[in-house]
Image: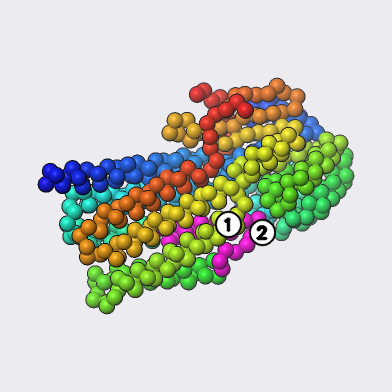
Amino acid sequence: MASSGFPSLDKLLGHEGYPDRSAILAVGPPGIGKEALGYRFAYAGLEKGEFSAYATSLAVRDVLQDIKAFGIDTAQRVPFWFAPSGGQLTYDVNDLANVSFNIKDVLKKNSDRRVRIVMESFSPFLMLNPPDTVYKFLSQLIAEVRESDAILFGTLEEGMHSTQVLAAMQLLFDGVLEMRFFEEGLRLVPLMRIKKMRGAPPEAGYYRFSVSRNGMEINAYVK
Amino acid sequence: MSSELLTFSVPVLGITIAFDAFSLYGAYLSASVWRGLVVPIYRGRALWLAAICVLGASMLTEFGVTAALAPSYGSTSPALREFVYLLPLAAILIWIDRTVNTVIRLDYLRRDVLLWRRLRYAYGSIAAVGILIYYSRYLYPIPDAMTVGFALIFSQLIYGMLTLARGAAVTKDMTFKSHIRWFGLFLLAFIVAGFIYVLTYSDASYLAPNLLAFAASAYCLYRMAKSLVPSGKLSAG
């Protein structure tokens, strides 16, 4: 198991975090906190001496600024970057073959230790490439992750894609965290649930959550 | 008076209260989304919308109450009324700039929309000059200040509306597309309200059609708040 970086989320996931050799998808509207899960997951790996790689379509400088806003110390350790600028390897969301090649190469070069890969959002892939091409790319990538001692964490923006695309994407992954706003009378409540997680029974319950510099607070949601 | 109260003032007050409720509920929804989000760029969008909804409701209330209780023009100071009108107008002009910048930043290919990156300073300057000319007629006797000021301000509003329409056409984000469409409709209603105001400036009955246009813009604000983020009822699926 690999810690998510948030003790409260680890507890929800069964005390230890995400399953080994798995691919996890966080789905939710832009800005709700999926990115924070990715940051914490990558840095939790670095703290344990694991190899963490972070793939983003933004400049590294911008992402580091966001990471600092969540109270993560970026002075001591930084992940291996795939980014359009400022990273060790370039990241072009239009070039799936190159992205795939680079990630597989990183997995091969770090086969002696656990690797954590965070891919900031799969939405640009789906917007710039046909869905079938993206499914194929992800299927191959996830198969590679399962063969290595690696965990892939990715995010998907809800509301940007059709329900069919969202459903098909969720089928590819071993675990799906759903985060979204729900209407309760006249109120909007941010809730999350573990929609599926390999090795765990399906979870029907929703949880109220908030992400801040101090971590993640999760409470059972009673309607 | 009692007949006028029943046939004019009560319906006007009813429309005002109903659409104020839409606008204020939009502000509440936006504030809820702002509280729930963690990423600054998205939080900023929600906060702007909440602020504009509150401004929209205050503007609608001013027009509605004035129209209902004092239908004859001149009961409220024109300078005061136009200040009430210009304050949200300035906020809307800034809000358009922030939104178009967000549209460009959220586009994964970083495409410009209708040369906005190059023309945004000209947009801001022309609109600011327009506002100054429009309002300065209360201080100095500038000929045609109202028409010139209005033309400058609304040409920029129309440019902003066209840019947003183009942004909505370009973006592949379905939620954002719907949000921007409602923004465009809001601007259209706001521009129509402005035209009615200027064209019927000296007419005693201008407040009622103006009120309807503002009511439509308040409804658009509510729809914008609803389309800020995808939301739904709880389901086990």
Q: Which residue is mark 2?
A: B109
x and y, in percent, of residue A129 in the image: 73, 51
Write down the chain letter for disc 1: B
Q: Which mark is residue A21?
A: none
Q: Determine whether the residue tagged by mark 1 lies in a helix, strand or loop.
A: helix
Q: Please name the residue shown 54% across and 25% down the image.
A: A221
Q: Please name the residue shown 65% across and 51% down the image.
A: A63
Q: Is residue B96 within the magenta segment?
A: yes
**Label 1 in the same subunit as label 2:** yes
* Main SS class of the magenta portion in the image: helix
Q: How many marks?
A: 2
Q: Please name the residue shown 76% across and 39% down the image.
A: A152
Residue type indicated by callout 1: Ala
Taking the view exactly as shown, the residue that stands out farthest to the bottom is: B143
Sequence order check, earlier mark of 1 and 2: 2
x and y, in percent, of residue B158 in the image: 45, 64
Check contact, mark 1 vs mark 2: CB within 8 A: no
Q: Which residue is mark 1?
A: B169
Q: What colour scheme governs how the chains and residues are painted in the rendered image of this protein?
A: rainbow
Query: The magenta stretch spans which residues?
Result: B91-115
